[in-house]
Image (cartoon, rainbow, N blue to C red):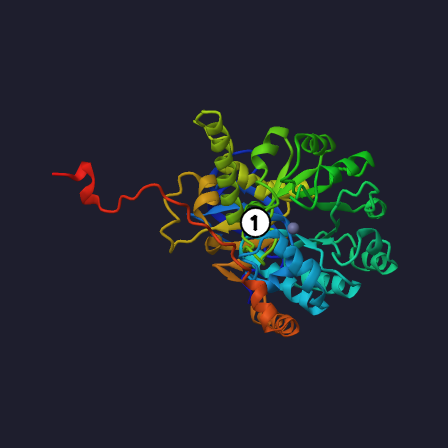
Amino acid sequence: MNEFAAGRPLVLRGGTVLPMDGRRVLPRTDVLVTGDRIAAVGPDLEAPGDAAEIDASGGIVLPGMIDTHRHMWQTAMRGYGADWTLTQYFVWYYLEHGKLFRPEDVHAGNTLAAIEALDAGVTTVVDWSHGLQTVDHADAAADALQAVPGRYVLAYGNIQQPPAEWTAAPEFRDFVRRRITGDDMLGFQIAFDVLGDPAFPEKPAFEVARELGAAVTTHAGVWGATSDDGIRLMYDHGFMTPGTIYVHAASLSADSYHRIAATGGSISVSTESEQSAGQGYPPTWAIRAHGIPVSMSMDTSVWWSGDLFSAMRATLGADRSREHLEAHAKGDTVTHAGLRAAQVVEWATRGGARALGRDDLGTIEPGKKADLVLIKNDLSPVSFPLLNPFGHVAFQAQRGDVHTVLVDGRVVKHEHRLLGVDLAAARRQVERTVEHLRSEMGEEAWERGMNPDIPATKILDNPYTYTDYRSSSTHRL
Ligand SMILES: [Zn+2]
């Protein structure tokens, strides 16, 4: 019998609970789950007699993490673009090879991405799905998301056509009617970028989104691609709304940040992406001063892994690094860090819930959805001492420490093992996709795509000719 049969109450006993309703830390606290909801939070809770128990002692319980921007279809090419710049990414996916992806390839990528998210304690993902070149691709994307037990938002996009075109297609409307039924496990957004053309060709796509009641998510402030011009166009036409998620928002002026703040939208920061790919400096150091809500994302597994521990760590590093450098440029010293570990943990949990308008996610409180993560690894020397739980999550923990994951009250990972997930089938699917792409591209293009040229580095002339320490005056005896 399944220890965690559907409908059976469950109690996580004695963990250090981070409810994320502020900065509280609740030591030795139980969390009781009945059905899809958190029923109670407190010490030594009475649980129903038939409740399953999970020993959370020595571990940290936090809300399921939320990623607000992940191109899940690209997970089938995991790690291929490790050495890319954004330009190489655009050439590979947008211009040269993106069209090779068949519906089954989108399905393969989405399936693996969804499993990967659950494994790492990411219980909600916005699938920024811009490879939907036909509605068959979209059906495949949705099929995959509905087959894996996580919470997803399908952000429908299509980089092969202008947004005004594909959003006007009757089959797109029909897809929304058929597949987006108000199920809270599969939300819906519309995903496209605003390129800054003064004629604002994206306007009809915004109108479709408004008519459908769907939020728009857009890559904003991406160096060389989207700029302040796009923000101004959206603002002037009244399309900046509280539901809008601005991804990256890295190369924007203060004026754009004011417009985002004033209209209530949020920014999805993908620090590892911004650092490596070149959208602009990871913006948290700047947007904190504007009071703009932040959520976290990892962007694409073609470069990075779908792991928000990594995102939290990179974001703290980038923000603090920038704060130090800005101070040093003025001859000052930062004596107190502005960005705290607790803040990035909040961005990775409650920040995502806020961005998605989901009041029922992102905190551990009675009545909220039971999307929970237990970080616990008794075999790891990094699991103790547990002195600063927020610092532990942000800087010490990693995906292998994710012991248990619940989504919608259902245990999907326990004792470090995924439940109800067919990893072998996902692997076979992804292997078929890789085979397909590789043979369509040809071996030479495949290799060239993965190994871009390295620009020559000139070793600087060095004015010092000192080579022998014995000739140094300080060593002369
Ligand atoms: Zn992206």
The residue that appears at 67% across and 41% down in the rendered structure is: 221
- Mark 1 Cα within 10 Å, few/some/many (few <14, many 20+)? many
Q: Is residue 306 left or right of residue 238?
A: left
The residue that appears at 78% across and 55% down in the rendered structure is: 180
Across and down, in percent, residue 74 comes to: 63, 60
Q: Quadrant of residue 130?
A: bottom right
Q: Is residue 456 left or right of residue 387?
A: right
Reply above or below: 375 against 443: above
Q: Quadrant of residue 294?
A: top right
* Closest to the observer, 13 or 89: 89
Q: Quadrant of the N terminus?
A: bottom right
Q: Quadrant of the C terminus?
A: top left
Across and down, in percent, residue 207 comes to: 85, 45
Reply above or below: 435 against 158: below
How many dots with numbers?
Answer: 1
Q: Which residue is mark 1?
A: 372
